[in-house]
Amino acid sequence: MSTATSAPSPPSPGEPGSSPRLRPVTTPPPLPALSARVGVRATARHSFAIARRNLLQVRNDPGQLLDSTLMPMIFTLIFLYVFGGAIWGGRDGDYKQFLLPGIMVQTIMFASRATGFTLSMDFGSGVMDRFRALPIARSAVLSGRIIADVCRLLLGQVVMLTFALVIGFSVRTGVLEAVAAVGVVLLYGTALAWVSAFIGLVVKSPNTVQAVGFLWMIPLQFGSSMLVPTETMSPWLRAFAEANPTTLVTDACRNLLIGGPVAGPLAGTLAWCLGLMLVAVPLSIRQYRKR
């Protein structure tokens, strides 16, 4: 006679031979796209926060201001007192009045190269990886860099104009015209800073960024009316110089400070600056997202 046997029940938790109960692993839902969560106000707030971070770096390392403060003074003394006699010759007028607005533009051009260099340094130090891990707008990293650099450029212009007045330069128009001259130069510097940012994002080596930034600005600086009148140039170089945006910016700044026609140079300056930024800004943001 057979008897029915029941299957042994599994041991309850806590009894010998029991195994801990496993909890199912759940994957958190993906975060929504950042662009859908960050508005204009938040983007502006992020940009100014990053700009503040960059300005604090300048405060802790004042040597970053040498290219926009001390170097322009040295170039002014060299071109004015070493080369001034050979360049100006027997021309009417004072070479000092002609030169110093050009040095203001040269100051902006030299200082704007630092934008690409500092961006390249931030990528090399890993700072950009931290920024990308934060819930901030992607464009805020670049715009914060530009805001900080514009503040540095403005300081350089104030220092340079003050130095010019000390060594005998005279503003022959008025205060509003002088402020407008600084504003025009700053606008050009902002456009060049965006171009420099694009170079710093494309080229990975900081030293190469500096070299490329210096090379592409050489024809813009010396093929212009920044240091010499365009009338003294050969015909082919004069044609290039008169279409050069640096010439337009320099002539606008010079005429705003010492008098002369402003409408033509100012319109050309605005067209060049807006054109450069319309190209460089989206390319820089795109390259930042790709890198």
Image (tube, rainbow, N blue to C red):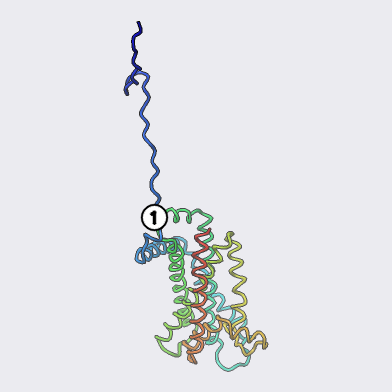
Residue 138, above or below 221 = above
**Residue 99 location in percent, x, y?**
55, 84
User: In which quadrant is the N terminus drawn?
Assistant: top left
Q: Which of 4 and 22 is in front in this view?
A: 4
Q: Residue at x 36, y 59 (%)?
A: 37
Q: In this view, does 25 lie to the left or right of 223?
A: left
Find residue 216 and report its image quarter. bottom right
Q: Can the viewer see residue 80?
A: no
Find residue 201 and report its image quarter. bottom right
The amino acid marked with disc number 1 is Pro
Q: Which residue is drawn at 50% across and 77% down?
A: 188
Find residue 162 and report its image quarter. bottom left
Which residue sits furthest top? Answer: 1
- Residue at mark 1: 32
Q: Can the viewer see residue 173?
A: yes
Q: Which residue is drawn at 40% across and 50% down?
A: 30
Q: Which residue is drawn at 51% across and 87% down?
A: 265
